[in-house]
Image (spheres, grey):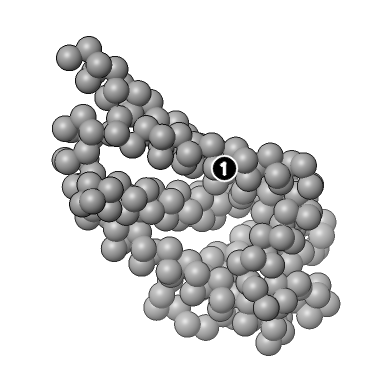
Amino acid sequence: MRTKLIFWLSMLCLLAATILLTIYLTWLFYPLEISWLHLENKVYLNSTTIQYNFNILMNYLTNPFQQKLSMPDFHSSAAGLHHFQTVKYLFHLVQLVFLATLPVVYLFVKHIIKKGYLSVFSKAVLSIVCLPIIVGAIAFGIGFDAFFTLFHKILFVGDNTWLFDPRKDPVIWILPEEFFRHTFLLFFALYEGFALLLYSWSKKSYLKKKGN
């Protein structure tokens, strides 16, 4: 029972870590998005100004000590600010989960990986590998537009402030759907990479036990 708890808390830490890594890599690579998506032509601002406003937004979303959002080149409606505040709380929740479960990863390495018990969880690891593939197949089947809408309806149930009106919240012009598609793909690649690495370890653990 204790080993199972360690395993699943470690998987929760892995999920939180992947989400956070996606967020910070998205922030790091945003200058490329400005170029790829031709955002300068959409808002008629230079790339430096767009990046500056994006940095303010991301600092607000990820920094628990930053409580006010004010982008100098983009006004915001009450609904828009409410949505960003909700996203901020979700980001902080992920940060909290990561920090709370991080010590468990030490126990995971010590009591499961080093002792060769990872093979016991091979089916669970396989399900962790397959789950995003299934979700990705659904997204591909219904189209990213429909998947993106469904994702928001599930995550922000009963709250439609995520439906931005560009006239009231022009910041949405520098956060187009293609940007979020790239973010989802980055998360998928990172998650699958970590999950496959874990699955590889579980198979090695199984073969090592079988050989003994």
Image check: 76 left or right of 27?
A: right
In which quadrant of the rendered image does the C terminus lie? top left
Mark 1 crowdedness (10 Å alpha carbons): few <14, some 14-19, many ≥20: some
| Vertical comparison of 191 with 87: above or below | above
Q: Is residue 177 at all visible to an observer of this figure?
A: yes
For this rendering, which residue is in front, 108 or 209? Answer: 209
Furthest-top residue in this view: 211
37 lies left or right of 57: right
Residue 15 horizontal side relative to residue 29, left or right = left
**Which quarter of the picture shows residue 96?**
bottom left
Residue 202 occupies quadrant: top left
The location of residue 115, given as percent across then percent down, is: 16, 32
Q: Quadrant of residue 204?
A: top left
Q: Residue at x 61, y 67 (%)?
A: 155
Residue drawn at (71%, 57%), measured in percent from left and top? 148
Picture layout, residue 87 above or below residue 204? below
Q: Residue 197's spot in the image, x, y percent?
A: 40, 31
| In the displayed structure image, the side of residue 123 where residue 53 appears, left or right | right
Disc 1: which residue: 132
Residue at the extreme front of the image, as rendered: 1
Q: Residue at x 16, y 40 (%)?
A: 110
Three-letter amino acid code at the position of disc 1: Pro
- The x and y percentages for residue 86 are 56, 76
Give the residue displayed 79% in from the left and 47% down from the top. 143
Q: For the residue labelled by badge 1, is the local secondary structure a helix, a strand or a loop?
A: helix
* Image height of 145 relative to 165, above or below: above
Q: Nearer the viewer, residue 67 or 129?
A: 129
